Image (spheres, helix red, strand yellow):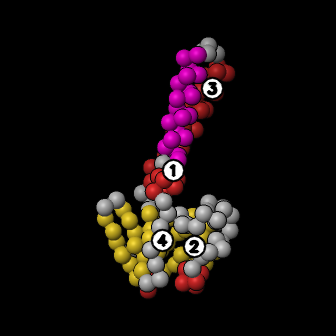
């Protein structure tokens, strides 16, 4: 079984939340540091709205990113202490998004997609060079 490290998974999963908190704290500091001119207030409101947008993205994306362990015969979706196992015949499609370095997994009979990170550290942009042949047969590029 090959799965991504926990550190990499949590960094990607909570990136938008951390960035939203950072933006909110910047807006708060700016609010108390600078004068209340209309230009400064517009900048503060813009930064705060940007943090709300990032938080909204976090709420949408958080449930869809999962840890996935892949082997030749099955795919295991790790969700905390729960593990759901699927055989490759139950997998409808796997897509690789090179720009985001993310895989999309669609399982037959299930609504929605599951997004997961590749295990290979060599993958930056493009299909990883060490991708197993059983996964290469299932993949279709986005």
Is residue 125 depicted above or below 25 in this figure? below
**5 vs 137, nearest the viewer:** 5
Of the numbered discs in the image, which one, if any, rests on residue 2? 4
The mark closer to the camera, 2 or 3, is 2
Could you tell me how far apart the alpha carbons at marks 4 and 3 are, in whole angstroms?
Answer: 48 Å
- Look at the image and tell me whether residue 142 can be seen: no
Q: Earlier in the sequence, mark 2 or mark 1?
A: 1
Secondary structure, mark 2, is strand
Q: Residues within 10 Å of mark 4 (few under 14, many from 20)?
A: few
Q: Closer to the observer: label 1 or label 4?
A: 4
Q: CA distance from mark 1 to mark 3?
A: 31 Å
Tell me which residue sits at (50%, 36%) in the image.
21
Name the N-terminal-most of marks 2 and 4.
4
Gap in angstroms between the C-alphas marked 2 and 4: 18 Å
Q: Residue 102 has which mark?
A: none
Q: Main structural element of the magenta stretch: helix, strand or loop?
A: helix
Q: Which residue is mark 3?
A: 42
Which range of residues does the magenta coloring cover?
A: 15-33
Name the disc covering residue 11, or none.
Answer: 1
Mark 4 and mark 3 lie on one chain; the one further toward the N terminus is 4
Q: Secondary structure at mark 4?
A: loop
Q: Are marks 1 and 4 in contact (CB under 8 Å)?
A: no
As drawn, is 84 to the left or to the right of 123? Answer: left
């Amino acid at each position: 079984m090959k799965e991504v490290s926990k550190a990499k998974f949590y960094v990607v999963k909570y990136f938008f939340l951390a960035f939203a908190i950072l933006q909110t704290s910047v807006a708060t500091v700016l609010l108390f540091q600078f004068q209340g001119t209309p230009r400064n207030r517009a900048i503060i409101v813009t930064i705060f709205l940007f943090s709300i947008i990032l938080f909204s993205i976090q709420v949408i994306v958080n449930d869809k990113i999962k840890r996935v362990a892949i082997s030749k015969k099955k795919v295991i979706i790790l969700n905390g202490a729960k593990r759901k196992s699927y055989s490759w015949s139950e997998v409808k499609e796997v897509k690789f998004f090179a720009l985001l370095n993310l895989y999309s997994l669609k399982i037959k009979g299930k609504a929605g997609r599951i997004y997961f990170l590749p295990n290979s550290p060599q993958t930056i942009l493009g299909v990883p060079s060490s991708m197993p042949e059983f996964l290469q047969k299932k993949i279709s590029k986005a």
